[in-house]
């Protein structure tokens, strides 16, 4: 492995069939509309060497300017992935995965993108990744459909991983991540391009990560634009 999984993006590589990964990735999101702290508890299981399922159970604290504030359960998400293409070579690999995320309307109707919409949504996409001992590249393209809302989204993610340490065993990694997210809300005709700079430390089965995300382009409705997001958390595989 050149580096661990991306922080704000996704990766098609699945290792250790039959293993579980517990993860949390807290997001502190500051927008023109208010401040939000999103704390998910995520559990994923590799059902085989080419398939995985997962569930995210998130807690949300929100403070909307000139509005409401409080704490509540956010929208629960169920994820499924299936790897249908794999090509390995010495010191490198290329893999492609089909991915779906089913968002359940368990959160309050706060109109918070990816956090708490209180409406069902189904995401369907493709994740492709190329990884060598010197670097990694991940891509994801997909569509998030919300039948009873106006948050239908066309999404593209691009990430680059740069390991700072040589591959070693037992596993010890220090990685930099450069991640982009392009998001077009089709029905509202809103668009944003985000950039996240992250750092990750991995030791054996434990990973710690930190990332700062800022908008490069933000063409949302006035009062709804992102100022920045701070991500921090970790994961443990067993």
Image (cartoon, grey):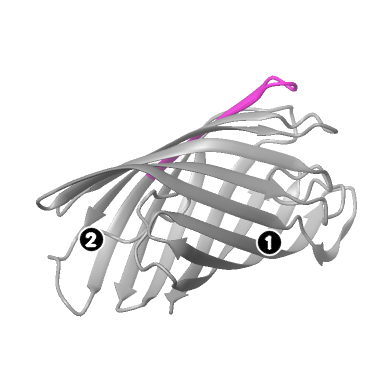
Residue 126 percent coordinates (x, y): 47, 36
- Looking at the image, the residue that sits furthest to the left is 90
Which quadrant would the N terminus be assigned to in this image? Answer: bottom left
Q: Is residue 59 above or below residue 133?
A: below
Give me the residue at 70% from left, 64% from top. 58
Q: Secondary structure at mark 2?
A: loop
Quarter-wise, where is residue 3 in the image? bottom left
Region of the chain picked out in magenta, as a range: 179-192
Left or right: residue 42 versus residue 104 is: left
Q: Is residue 131 above or below residue 191?
A: below
The first of marks 2 and 1 along the sequence is 2
Q: Is residue 81 above or below residue 232?
A: above
Give me the residue at 76% from left, 63% from top. 61
Quarter-wise, where is residue 189 in the image? top right
Q: Nearer the viewer, residue 231 or 187?
A: 187
Q: CA distance from mark 2 to mark 1?
A: 32 Å
Residue 143 percent coordinates (x, y): 60, 31
Quarter-wise, where is residue 72 in the image? bottom right
Q: Nearer the viewer, residue 226 or 168?
A: 168
Left or right: residue 81 versus residue 16 is: right
The number of discs equals: 2
Give me the residue at 42% from left, 66% from top. 209
Q: Which residue is mark 2?
A: 1
Which quadrant would the C terminus be assigned to in this image? Answer: bottom left
Residue 80 percent coordinates (x, y): 56, 51
Q: Which residue is mark 1?
A: 37
Tell me if residue 24 is in the magenta stretch. no
Which mark's residue is nearer the viewer, 2 or 1?
Answer: 2
Residue 212 percent coordinates (x, y): 47, 53
Q: Nearer the viewer, residue 219 or 85?
A: 85
């Amino acid at each position: 492995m050149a580096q661990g999984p991306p922080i704000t993006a996704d990766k098609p590589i699945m290792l250790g069939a039959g293993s579980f990964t517990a993860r949390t990735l807290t997001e502190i999101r500051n927008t023109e509309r208010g401040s939000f702290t999103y704390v998910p508890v995520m559990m994923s299981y590799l059902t085989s060497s080419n398939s995985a399922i997962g569930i995210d159970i998130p807690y949300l604290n929100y403070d909307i300017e000139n509005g409401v504030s409080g704490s509540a359960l956010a929208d629960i998400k169920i994820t499924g992935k299936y790897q249908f293409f794999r090509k390995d070579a010495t010191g490198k690999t290329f893999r492609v995965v089909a991915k779906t995320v089913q968002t359940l309307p368990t959160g309050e109707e706060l109109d918070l993108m990816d956090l708490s919409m209180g409406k069902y949504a189904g995401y369907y996409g493709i994740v492709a990744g190329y990884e060598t001992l010197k670097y990694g590249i991940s891509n994801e393209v997909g569509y998030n459909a919300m039948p009873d809302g106006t948050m239908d989204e066309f999404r593209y993610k691009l990430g680059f991983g740069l390991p700072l340490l040589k591959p070693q065993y037992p596993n010890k990694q220090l990685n930099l991540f450069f991640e982009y997210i392009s998001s077009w809300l089709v029905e509202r005709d809103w668009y944003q391009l985000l950039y996240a700079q992250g750092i990750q430390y991995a030791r054996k089965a434990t990973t710690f990560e930190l990332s700062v995300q800022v908008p490069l382009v933000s063409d949302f409705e006035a009062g709804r634009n992102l100022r920045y997001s701070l991500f921090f958390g970790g994961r443990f595989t067993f």
